[in-house]
Every structure is written in C-alpha cells, then in structure tokens.
Image (cartoon, grey):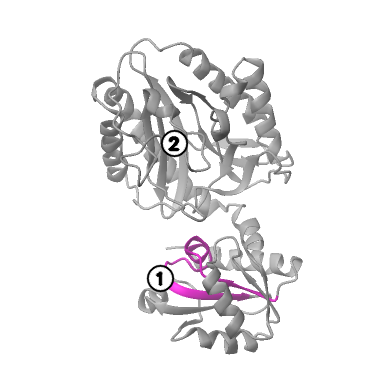
Amino acid sequence: MVPAEEIARRHAALQEELAADGLDAVLVVEASDLVYLTGVMADAHLVVARAGEPVLLVRRGIERAIADSPLADVRPLGSLRELGPVLAERGVRRLGLEMDVLPAARYLRYGQLLEGIELADGAEAIARVRAVKSPWEAGCMRRAAAQLGEAFRAAPDLVAHEETDLAIQIELERVLRRAGHQGPLRFRGLNGVMFYGAVLAGPDGAVAPWADTPLGGPGPNAAVGKGPGGWRIADGDAVTVDLVGAADGYLADATRTFFRGEPRAPLAEALRVCAAILDDLEGLMRPGVPAQDLYRRGLELATDAGFGDHWMGHGPARVRFVGHGIGLDINERPFLAEGFEAPLAAGNAIAVEPKLVFPGVGAVGVENSYLVTESGPERLT
C-alpha cells in the first residue's frame, strides 16, 4: 500500500504544477495517473484542485478504494452529471484533462456536461510530477530490477539448450513470476500493448516493429505482430533478451544479448560497440544535461564505429531515441530523444538501450535502468 505521506507529497507537487499552468484543477481518469495519485486502481474520476483536498469519485470498486487509498474524501459517482457540482464547489473555471490519452467521445461528453468550464491540457502537469521519483518509488523499482537479475541468471542455460526464442521467452516468464513479477504492465498511449518484454533470436530480432521501439519481432501471429515468433536457434545466432520487471506497479527495463556458438559477423563487434556506448552515456546521466544529448552522443559513437545505419533500428523503422523514462508506465518522461531539450533532473528514472539492427541477420544491444542522482547515475539493473 502506498504510504499516505507519499500520496500527499504527490498532490502537493501537482498543485504547484497546476498553478504554473494556470489550471484551477485537473480531472484524472487514466489508470496509471489514478494509481499514482490515489494508490489504487478503480473506475473513478479524481479531482485535484489547486487548493484543498482531492476528491475521488468512484463508479465501480468503491469498497476497495475506501479500504486501500489514503485519500480522505472518497465518494460514489452515480453519473457523470455529478461532476459539475463537485467542480463548482471548488470554483473551477479552467479544468485540465489528460489530453494525450482521453478518448474523444469522453472529451465531447465533458464539454456538454461542464458548461462554462474551459477544458485544457492537464497531462503535462501530471507528467512533470511523475518524472521525479521519490525514495519510496525507487525502492519499488529496485525490487523490479531484482526480478530481472533472476531472469538474466537463468538465460544463458536456456539460450544454450532451448530450441526457439519463444521457448526461452516462456521459461523466462515463469522465472519472473516466481520472482514476484505482478504480470500486467502499462504502456501509455493509443494501441499501447505491453508484455514481459521479448526474446528475439536470429533474423526475428531484425523484423521491423509497428510500435515506437527499436526491436519488434514477428510475434505469435499477425494480430499481435511483436515479440518472438518461434525462430529455431542456430549456431551463430544472437539472442536479445529484453525484459521488464514489475513490483508494486513500478517497472525496471533491461536487455542482454547472448550468442549460440560463434557469433555471425558483425554481431560480436556490434555488441561490443553497444556496450561501449552505454558506458560512455553513463557520464551524461546527470542533472542539467539535455535529454537529447544522450541520443546524439550515441548516434555519434555508433556512426564513428561504422554502424550509423543500424543505430536503433534500420530503414524507416529506425527510432530517434536511445532511452526513455520508466515508472508506472514503460514510456514516461524524460525521453532521451531528438528534440527533447528538457534537462535531466535528480530523481529521473531512465532506461538507456543502445541497440544495432542488421536485416536478415539479427539484432544486438544492451540496456540498463538508472536513477539519476546529484552524484551521478545509480544503476538499478
């Protein structure tokens, strides 16, 4: 259960951000934001105003919300029409919504019901608060990282003896669950599909993704279109093991690459370059460094090594980032991406993943999760 003082700290930080954005309140309905600000998952609307206590209006699951959330004001919500009076009590004239994920139908419905209230974007204020992790959150992420340690210790024997990448994936999922993995994961955004990660062997590792990720894989079928497809591992194949641990809602992300037998050219050298890039980027994981600098430095080093065309994908499927924030979602602020100029801050939790992809041959890479601190990065994985 999330401590009451942790929830109170988050609300106080959010109220400051609302004031900075000129919002009177924010209306929260998205799952990860609800968990972050209430400590529980429910079918609910949370109202956080610039002043005063928040109110959680629950449509389904109110008994658990009352029992598990430290919020003092938890009420049933029988109809969306009840939102107007609650907002009027707080003098709300400009209301923030989670514009990045809110369905259009729901937005239009709010516009009909909340006459006289200006609807604006509140997602940015929430994202800025969530980007800085507390010691309590960091503790959850360390437990998630420990799960990955169990999986990576089991991986070499599985790579040596299992016939396919899918078989390795299944066994590693078992290891993760026995290590305490919660199962479901969250990926923010439209069509966000998240699993334990992916084990990709041989050419499967170079199958272009439909998602905004450097690696994709064919998946079990065309309806899923990502993850292992059952490639039968042969001598010389690279096997990338990209996994996500999850404890108390919080995630840790890491990748290791293994080989069956003598690696095919140029995979061994490419993996050495990825490891060297990650070592170099650790020197930039400090408060005040623009997030995009890590991407640019990684691309520079990959290009200097002769692998620029394979950096973070290939062809039109290449992504323009080398990492991302992590927390309750796998894709949080900050984004270590071209165009993301905001500087890193102490408390940011980031996954950094230099990867190189070779069509028809495979992919290699390494990834660790880090906590940014004033004295440098703390490696979680």
Relative to the observer, which residue lies in front, 290 or 311? 311
Query: Which element is circle 1 on?
Result: helix
Left or right of residue 79: residue 100: right
Left or right of residue 371: residue 24: right
Height in image: 20 above or below 49? above
The boundaries of the magenta stretch are 24-48
Left or right of residue 302: residue 39: left
Residue 294, x across and y down, in percent? 66, 33
Q: Which residue is mark 2?
A: 216
Relative to the observer, which residue lies in front, 29 or 350? 29
Q: Which mark is residue 107?
A: none
Inter-mark Cα distance, 1 to 2 = 38 Å
Q: How many marks?
A: 2
Height in image: 100 above or below 147? below
Q: Which mark is residue 68?
A: 1
Residue at (43, 67) in percent of width and height: 40
Is residue 47 rendered magenta in the image? yes
Q: Can the viewer see residue 239?
A: no
| Callout in the foreground (1, 2) | 2
Which picture quadrant has residue 309? top right
Residue at (43, 55) in percent of width and height: 249
Residue at (64, 27) in percent of width and height: 298
Query: Which element is circle 2 on?
Result: loop
Q: Can the viewer see residue 249?
A: yes
Q: What amino acid type is highlighted by mark number 1? A: Asp
